[in-house]
Image (cartoon, rainbow, N blue to C red):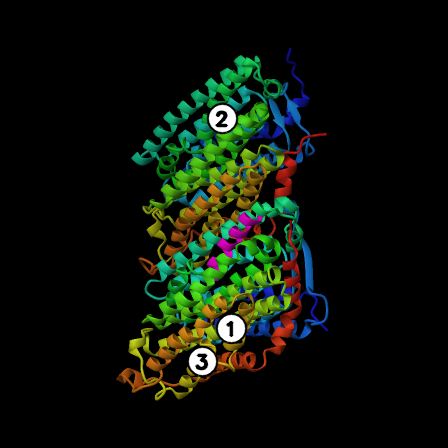
Amino acid sequence: MQFPHLLSLLIWLPIAGSIVVLALRSRPEVARWVSLAFALATFLASLQLWTGYDRSGPLLQFVESQPWIAALNANYALGVDGISVALIVLTTLAHLLVVISSWGQIKDRVALYMASMLAMEGVLVGVFATTDALLFYVFFEAMLIPMFLIIGAWGGPRRIYATLKFFIYTFFGSIFMLIALIYLHLKTGEFSLAAFAAAPLDATEQAWLFFAFVAGFAIKVPMWPVHTWLPDAHVEAPTGGSVILAAIMLKVGGYGFIRFSLPIVPDASHEFAWVIIASSLIAIIYIGYVALVQEDMKKLVAYSSVAHMAFVTLGIFIALALVRTHGNPLGARLGVQGAMVQMISHGFVSGAMFACIGVMYDRLHTRMIKDYGGLSQPMPWFAMFFVLFSFANCGLPGTSGFVAEFMVILAAFQDSPLIALLAAFTLVIGAAYTLWLVKRIVFGPVTSERVAGMQDLNPREWIVLAVFAIGVLAIGFYPKPLTDLMEPAVQNLVQQLALSKF
Amino acid sequence: MPTFNPADLRVIAPELFLVCSTFAILLIDLFLKPTQRHVTHWLALLALVVAGALVWSGAPPMGEVAAAFDGMFLRDGMATLLKLFVLLTIALVFVYSRPYQRDRGLNIGEFYLLLLFAALGMMLLISAGNLVTVFLGLELMALSSFALVALNRDSPLSSEAAIKFFVLGALASGLLLYGMSMLYGATGTLDLAQIRAVSDFTAGSPHRTLLAFGLVFLIVGIAFEFGAAPFHMWLPDVYHGAPTSITLFISSASKLAAFGLAYRLLEGALGGLGADWTFMLALLATLSLAVGNVIAIAQSNLKRMLAYSTISHIGFALLGFVNGTQQGFAAALFYMICYALMSTVAFGIMMVLARVGFEAEEIDDFKGLNQRNPWYAGLMAIAMFSLAGVPPLWGFFAKLMVLKVAIDAGYLWLAIVAIIFAIVGLFYYLRVVKVMYFDAPADDTPLVAPADYPLRWVLSLNGLALLVMGMAWSPLMEWCTRAFAVAG
């Protein structure tokens, strides 16, 4: 038996929670527990989505629709396919972990912090759950407000610069998307994604729309060369903000590509796929090298995020060439599927990496690699988790990173061995910067008194990292439940790609 | 030959009531001691409420026009809607500024009376069906505004602002009158509907040149009332120099009235020249967006910043006008209403935070407001995000509607200009939020708002409306659309 408005519940429960928490301003301890209760309730409810989604049923499930704005024919329309289900569950899980992990980290204005986190959870679920373009846009932009506050109020020394850059940069991209959506609305008279996907569009229109969408989503992913806001935002954000930014918010960009660019402007996507593919390959190789020279752990992981998210865009856009030029829908499915697995996998891996850095930062209040060394001796448990996540970050078999990157490279090979070769460089570069990081931080002699005095994980941190570790290993060893869940949606998308809109 | 028809009085009942009650309050106020000024306050509010009720109850059905005095005075759907919001914003001015005026010894009868006269002028202007009524309403409103700006007569800044406002206002009125004389010369009538009838069929005739010539002067007058660049020079100085309560009035009710002026003159009289004025307005919009957003960045005074932000918002509202259809005017009106209610929140909070001898008008005065009074910081943040046009707030949807009608009318370039400047504008709104939430307060004492309960509740409702309307603005938009419906 399912709750009839499960998706609405998942959106509004955390938002209601944020209002409740905001009212508990003067009692931080109560605010923490109430936030935990709301985050846990949302997560448990979202599990119903996972169990209740009928893998053999229709594509869109848990559908809700209410008239919202009559003048624009926009609806409060929700509905999820397998991809959305996976991302929503990832969102609720990540927020639960963030609420737990920020327990001792945030001491100032706890209620406002927790309220921002809960509000963001609801908004992010909304992004993944809606099937109406205007509602999507509203959620897409609304998530900036809580993140703006989180980075600006609890961030590091240059937080103001970072948060303003983050907000204005992402707003800049998405506002062009708004023009595209209005244009499509005037064309179709509706705001539903299905109507947009069915609208006939000529080549010029498609090209303009394509670049408007790219402006919105490429900045969010973020793709080279519009990634520069990310290292700043990550470095200055508090740990919880970094985790959500890396684990969920970046995924919105990739999700946007498959929900908007591919179905609405397939021909332009095909025509300009080389732009995205080239940019992805540059990100994989060049940004990988940039990560190598970082002295700040958070910056290093931020750049590695850019490199890893490039696999998402690569997998998505390689599919077009496979379907259209090679007539190889199976390969295309592999590419898209790989991209989607990479989104989930990167959510776990990067979230975990930032959580680990948060653990270290809490103890020593520095993010510089040179301040650490030989952590395996004072913190053996931590070292174990950190090494595991690092392996996942460089795509070692048995971890989730390997599955996703392997699928994308395999798909790329069917299009062009050269692209596959360049993409496969990540295995070398990724291993280089990650393992070197591990070597400098975890192994070797203990470098200073302060490091020697560091406490190992407390139970709260242990739980958070263990959950991340389970996710990484589960996808690494047995990705089938995840790919089965997303397969119908991927298949449908690839079918859509094959049809020209002319 | 015009004849007096008693039924006409029913049509202008709200205005009649307002003028009678204003004179009554004028008399009553004479006999009140300064300590009894609250009587004037409540009577003035009551007058506005009753006038509003009369506007509402006697409204003709949507799409129909009730005309009085041979078409001098029109009552249509637009007039009903706009008058209600003008009365609402003036009522908000009364409520928000009471403690502010009291602290400064400005809680005098003239404040209420001049505002009521201004309200009367606005209502006349909105309902004008004749160039004479347009000018009558406009001047009644403008003269009251000049006096209001100088209300704090001991302040050199106020007096300077009032003189600037007066001189430039007189010049703009002169230009407007000159334009009106052209219209009269070309058509031989002062009646807006008859001018419209002529202007609809002038293609190729010499009258057209004359009308277009007059149109240019009318646009100057309208742009002055709106504060659209390049006729915006008075706006920052007046915003800055006037007492905050009057700034609130000028940025909300006056802008709504300016919308009425623009609609009556451009669509009501010169609809036939739509192709000419839409392009002129598109240029004004571009300039306003550029000047407003770019110069606002450099301001450290919040009132001046909001003045430039007003200019940029006028640019956005003009996007609706360039469409020149029912949908376009509806979107522009929706935008103006939204803007008026956003600026009431911003200026309302500035007044709440002001103290005796301290005006909370520098951006730095808002430092750490979140620690000192989280509720008002939250409301101000809502207002700023809404002004910036960030969803899910109301301001975003207002922008969405005008962008939609502009693109629909083929002004895609203008829409792109508008969004680029919206990104520029985002910066200075975010700076206010940054100051409130991320900076440490200059002193840690909690800020206690004035204990005027209606003020607190109304201001909170006003602020939350920006949030709620983000989800439930559809009925208001429909109302705006129906307000411009044409009968038949």
Looking at the image, is mark 3 or mark 2 nearer the viewer? 3
- Magenta run includes residue B384: no
On the image, the x and y values in percent for residue B360 come to 36, 48
Look at label 3 and name its amino acid: Phe
Could you tell me residue B281's position as x and y percent? 49, 31
Task: Identify the mark nearer the N-term, 3 or 1.
Answer: 3
Q: Position of residue B275 (x, y in %)?
A: 55, 27
Q: Is residue A229 left or right of residue B322?
A: left
Q: What's the distance in space between the residues labelled 3 and 2, CA to CA?
A: 74 Å
**Quarter of the image where the N terminus of chain A is located:** bottom right
- Magenta-drawn stretch contains A213: yes
Q: Position of residue A409 (x, y in %)?
A: 52, 71
* Mark 1: amino acid: Glu
Q: Is residue B42 visible?
A: no
Discs 1 and 2 share one subunit: no
Along the line of sight, the residue nearer the viewer: A30 or A209: A209
Residue that mark 3 sits on:
A391
**Residue drawn where x is 68% and y is 60% of the image:** A64
Give the residues drawn in magenta, as a range: A206-222
Subunit of mark 1?
Answer: A
The local crowd at label 3, few if under 14, some if 14 to 19, many if 20 or more residues have their Cα within 10 Å, is: many
Q: Chain of mark 3?
A: A
Tell me the chief SS of the magenta region: helix
Q: Which mark is residue B138?
A: 2
What residue is shown at x 58% (from left), y 73% (from top)?
A43
Looking at the image, residue A86 lies above or below residue B461: below
- CB within 8 Å, label 3 to label 1: no
Cα gap from disc 1 to disc 2, whole angstroms? 69 Å
Label 3 close to label 2 by CB (< 8 Å) = no
| Vertical side of B446 occupied by B176: above or below | above
Q: Disc 1 designates what residue? A: A405
